[in-house]
Amino acid sequence: MWKVRPKLDHACRRVCTIIPLNSIGRAAHLIGTYVSTALPREYRYQDCNHTFKTFYVNKYIDHHAHELAL
């Protein structure tokens, strides 16, 4: 798996841009790189982009992967 991290500007803030949907080639499964401390019980998955500093990219994910979880 590849390891990626968000792009930061000179003030260490995340660079945000808008990308057109037709420029997305395929879906990616991002897995946050975990540390030795546990996440709190009230942790929301919506916050993962802001919680983790780096992610693993699962390049083997495909559009049928959601069917495996059902």
Image (spheres, rainbow, N blue to C red):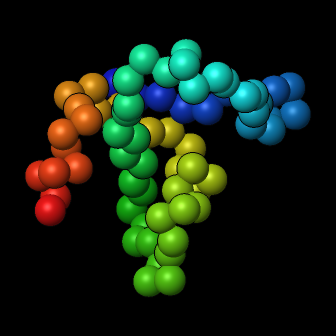
State the image coordinates of residue 26 (x, y, percent, origin top left). Answer: 38, 23
Q: Quadrant of residue 46?
A: bottom right
Q: Is residue 35 above or below residue 27?
A: below
Question: Looking at the picture, how far across and down is residue 56, in whole percent?
Answer: 37, 36
The image position of residue 21, as x and y in percent, is 57, 26
Left or right: 57 as drawn, with respect to 22: left
Q: Nearer the viewer, residue 32 or 24?
A: 24
Q: Give the total of numbered labels.
A: 0
**Which residue corresponds to the image point at 44% horizontal and 83% vertical from the top-left?**
41
Quadrant position of residue 5? top right
Looking at this view, is 57 or 19 the one in front? 19
At a point 42% along the width and 17% down the height, the residue shown is 25
Residue at 56 percent across and 44 percent down: it is: 53
Residue farthest along the front direction in this orientation: 22
Q: Position of residue 12 (x, y in %)?
A: 79, 35
Does 15 sit above or below residue 64? above
Which of the 4 image quadrants contains residue 55? top left
Please report the residue visible at 86 percent of the width from the left and 26 percent of the height from the top: 10
Is residue 37 toward the left or the right of residue 21 in the image?
Answer: left
